[in-house]
Image (cartoon, rainbow, N blue to C red):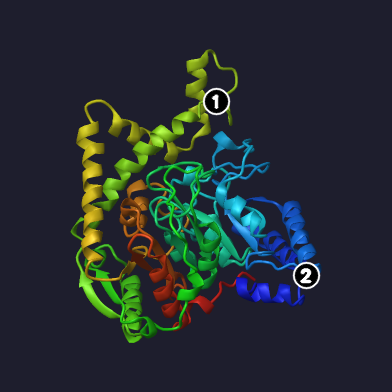
């Protein structure tokens, strides 16, 4: 399947219709889903109706936007009116939202075609998409390996060309890590740049919706459509959204010599040597493109993981308290009384990882432990943020590996939660600081699995991310390679 801009040209020139493009995506989904399991729900009828509406506009000479008629996948923790939104959990298996999330509303207004809802770790808690209550998504590059998580369904769907672009959510790396594992581009925007209205909450101070694409340009086009102020979200930023496409230039020199910092704490022990070699080579490529490279120390970076696993579960324990079998979603059968109904509903409706994080969070917030754990974690969060602020006084952009390894085999880490948590070691500090981060493909390991380079910029400087990532992408062949799926 072609890029957004290529498909747009085909539509406006009437070389192809939106219905034809949509049917191609739906046929590919039907052919690949038995082995990939990227989608929890395929919305074929709705997609074809949206495509027909785009074709009708073209037929009468009406101008269409870049996203009109483009097949898009939506992570299944974004509310879609009249279409099930399960969050990959049994507790919401029959939940059909009565309202639409702001981002899906914006995409519908832009003429995008929603082909389905993608699989995820339950309530976005996980790094492998093995925690879904319904199915385990496979990595398109190797069906025995995981696609990353929690947005593994969206990443796999884009990599396998089941859709052109997709939306995910990122709480501690849930867009960037699966983008790295699946060899696509994934962006976690500045906190507040994209409305969270209609995103089912995991950790409200960390969650952010962002795009997946097979190219930097496709990710930029999708972000352009969903970014912007929303009065329904109290954390939404009321800022002007630039035209991100203006920053997509093939080299770095016309806009001055970019200063890029390499975070030294992300190298060394725990990093796969193959990943380190690929990232080091990518940094050299950025230097060849005209960037000035320097090593930057972020001493508090190493405390990101323990800080996250106190703050995020604490917020989750509060956010998930609403699932009690009373208001909506799953309710246990034959409850003896209301307290028994609460207990049985949550015991039967939540999976083991969600229960684990609720218990961690409830413990951290309990009397006698709040100051020792939660309050201390918030103080460390401030130190991490200050490290980044000092770094951005010296450089325009920071780079490091997106993940410490390439995709691991399904089942390899399920018995060891701590080992699984380490998958997000490089991405978590970005969420704690509310910064934008992007993963771009930068090579493959000896097993043919993709490797991602993470780029981090200052608040609201997605323009720099896109500029540097695009220049790097266009000078390397990694984005042109596709997984073989038979």
Q: Quadrant of the N terminus?
A: bottom right
**Disc 2 versus disc 1: nearer the observer:** 2
Which residue is painted at 61% across and 37% down in the image? 93
Can residue 237 be seen here? The reply is yes
Q: Is residue 315 above or below residue 463?
A: above
* SS type, badge 1: loop
Report the label total: 2
| Residue 319 pos. (x, y %) | 43, 35
Q: Nearer the viewer, residue 421 or 246?
A: 246
How far is mark 2 from mark 1, CA to CA?
A: 51 Å
- Residue matched to label 2: 61
* Residue 410 relative to residue 280: left or right: right
Tell me which label, 2 or 1, sits earlier in the chain: 2
Q: Is residue 204 above or below residue 456?
A: above
For disc 1, the neighbor class at 10 Å (few under 14, some 14 to 19, many from 20) is: many
Name the quadrant containing residue 181. bottom left
Name the quadrant containing residue 472. bottom left
Task: Residue 325: give its label.
Answer: 1
Name the quadrant containing residue 394. bottom left
Can residue 34 be seen here? The reply is no
* SS type, badge 2: loop
């Amino acid at each position: 399947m072609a890029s957004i801009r290529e498909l747009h040209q085909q539509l406006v020139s009437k070389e192809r219709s939106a219905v034809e493009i949509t049917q191609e995506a739906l046929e590919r989904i039907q052919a690949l889903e038995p082995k990939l399991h990227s989608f929890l729900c395929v919305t074929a009828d709705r997609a074809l109706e949206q495509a027909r509406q785009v074709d009708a506009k073209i037929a009468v000479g009406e101008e269409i936007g870049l996203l009109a008629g483009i097949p898009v996948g939506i992570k299944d923790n974004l509310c879609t009116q009249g279409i099930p939104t399960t969050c990959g959990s049994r507790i919401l298996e029959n939940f059909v939202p009565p309202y639409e999330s702001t981002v899906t509303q914006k995409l519908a207004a832009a003429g995008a075609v929603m082909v389905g809802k993608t699989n995820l770790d339950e309530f976005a808690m996980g790094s492998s998409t093995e925690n879904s209550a319904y199915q385990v998504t496979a990595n398109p590059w190797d069906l025995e390996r995981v696609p990353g998580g929690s947005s593994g369904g969206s990443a796999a769907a884009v990599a396998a060309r089941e859709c052109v672009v997709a939306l995910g959510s990122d709480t501690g790396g849930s867009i960037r890590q699966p983008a790295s594992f699946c060899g696509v581009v994934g962006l976690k925007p500045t906190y507040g740049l994209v409305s969270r209205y209609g995103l089912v909450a995991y950790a409200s101070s960390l969650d952010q919706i962002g795009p997946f694409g097979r190219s930097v340009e496709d990710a930029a086009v999708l972000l352009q459509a969903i970014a912007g102020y929303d009065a329904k979200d109290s954390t939404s930023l009321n800022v002007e959204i630039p035209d991100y496409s203006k920053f997509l230039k093939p080299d770095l020199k016309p806009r001055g010599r970019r200063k890029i910092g390499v975070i030294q704490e992300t190298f060394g022990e725990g990093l796969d040597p193959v990943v380190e070699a690929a990232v080091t080579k990518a940094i050299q490529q950025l230097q060849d493109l005209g960037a000035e490279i320097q090593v930057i120390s972020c001493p508090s970076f190493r405390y990101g993981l323990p800080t996250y696993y106190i703050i995020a579960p604490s917020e989750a324990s509060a956010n998930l308290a609403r699932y009690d079998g009373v208001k909506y979603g799953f309710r246990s059968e034959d409850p003896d009384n209301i307290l028994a109904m609460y207990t049985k509903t949550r015991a039967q409706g939540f999976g083991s990882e969600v229960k684990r994080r609720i218990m961690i969070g409830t413990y951290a917030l309990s009397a006698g432990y709040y100051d020792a754990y939660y309050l201390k974690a918030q103080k460390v969060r401030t130190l991490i943020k200050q490290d980044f602020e000092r770094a951005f006084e010296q450089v325009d952009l920071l780079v490091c590996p997106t993940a410490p390894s390439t995709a691991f085999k399904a089942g390899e880490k399920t018995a060891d939660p701590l080992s699984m948590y380490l998958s997000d070691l490089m991405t978590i500090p970005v969420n704690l600081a509310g910064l934008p981060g992007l993963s771009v493909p930068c090579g493959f390991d000896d097993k043919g699995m993709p490797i991602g380079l993470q780029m981090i910029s200052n608040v609201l400087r997605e323009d720099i991310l896109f500029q540097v990532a695009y220049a790097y992408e266009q000078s390397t062949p990694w984005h042109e390679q596709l997984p073989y799926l038979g």
